[in-house]
Amino acid sequence: MRYILFLFAFSFSAYAEKTITLATLAGYAPYTFKYTKKVDGVKAGENITPGKDTRSLQGIAWDIVRESFHSQGYTIKLHVYPWARALKQMKQGKVDGLFPTTKTVARSKFFYFSKNATNSYSTCFYTKAKTQFKFLGLSSLKGKTVGVIRGFSYGNKFDTYKKNLKVRPSRGDRESFLMLEKNRIDVYVGYDIVADYFLKKTNQLGKFKRHAPIDFNYEFLATNLDNQKKIQKIKDFDKGVEVIKKNGAFQKILNKWGIDELKVNPALK
């Protein structure tokens, strides 16, 4: 009897230890953003056990991350911060994982990235609808004031060229498009799905023009490169992505958000 109790206690303890603390941002619809009305769920920072959700965050990327970890038996502790703070928390090792994170050469020096992505996007430039501006490559931005979101990466192409430009940071799409409308910036660089979602929700699609994309990027779940225990948790996330693809949960997420396709596997061209 004691042996059985010992095995039960050991098994319960092993299960209970499968927790992961994650940091992310809000204001990044449709990938990670807050509810506009009160809903049921767990508060941020509290345990989100398999089958449960939080009332502090919603979005495609969050659904994929949550379902993937839950399929592997993980309990999630979620913290929602402004992006710059979330990034700092991950760099300092105060959390186990950060998402959604664009993989760059600079970040790869201290972050380990998941094999599967949490979401993907094209990097595009936006101007006022009536502005006579032709985007003919990054060199056409010289002499322009370019709006960016503070702490964001836009892929290696833009990040490398950015030193040649006059950039003006903002806290998000809302502030950036307002600056564009008020002529405080000439061009805004954004993620197409995110920026278009914001413009559609705020009935501003006709006020701005999206130019041809310069890059396509994936965003990942990242952790500290020097911590093998955390890296194993990211590998478990990758296993979970494959599970939810097979059991239909991934497709349910796409159906929920009205998306026909979302590329999350960079290995598949």
Image (cartoon, rainbow, N blue to C red):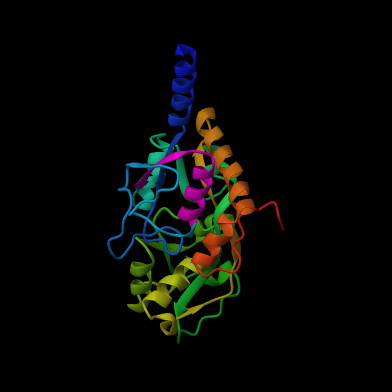
The verdict on residue 162 being magenta is no
As drawn, 145 above or below 10? below
In this rendering, does residue 212 appear at all?
A: yes
The verdict on residue 73 being magenta is yes
Magenta stretch in the rendered image: 61-79
Q: Residue at x 59, y 62 (%)?
A: 262
Q: Whole-percent x and y of residue 145?
A: 42, 69
Q: Is residue 117 left or right of residue 43?
A: right
The residue most toward the right is: 269
As drawn, 131 above or below 88? below
Q: Whole-percent x and y of residue 138?
A: 57, 67
In this rendering, does residue 191 appear at all?
A: no
The residue most toward the left is: 38
Quarter of the image where the C terminus is located = bottom right
| Of 262 and 50, the residue lying toward us | 50
Residue 204 found in image quarter: bottom left
Q: Whole-percent x and y of residue 260?
A: 59, 69
The residue most toward the front is: 1
Q: Residue at x 55, y 68 (%)?
A: 259
Q: Residue at x 44, y 59 (%)?
A: 59
Q: Is residue 1 left or right of residue 176?
A: right
| Of 266 and 56, the residue lying toward us | 56
Q: Residue at x 28, y 65 (%)?
A: 37
As drawn, 150 above or below 138? above
Q: Whole-percent x and y of residue 229?
A: 51, 29
Q: Is residue 37 left or right of residue 232?
A: left
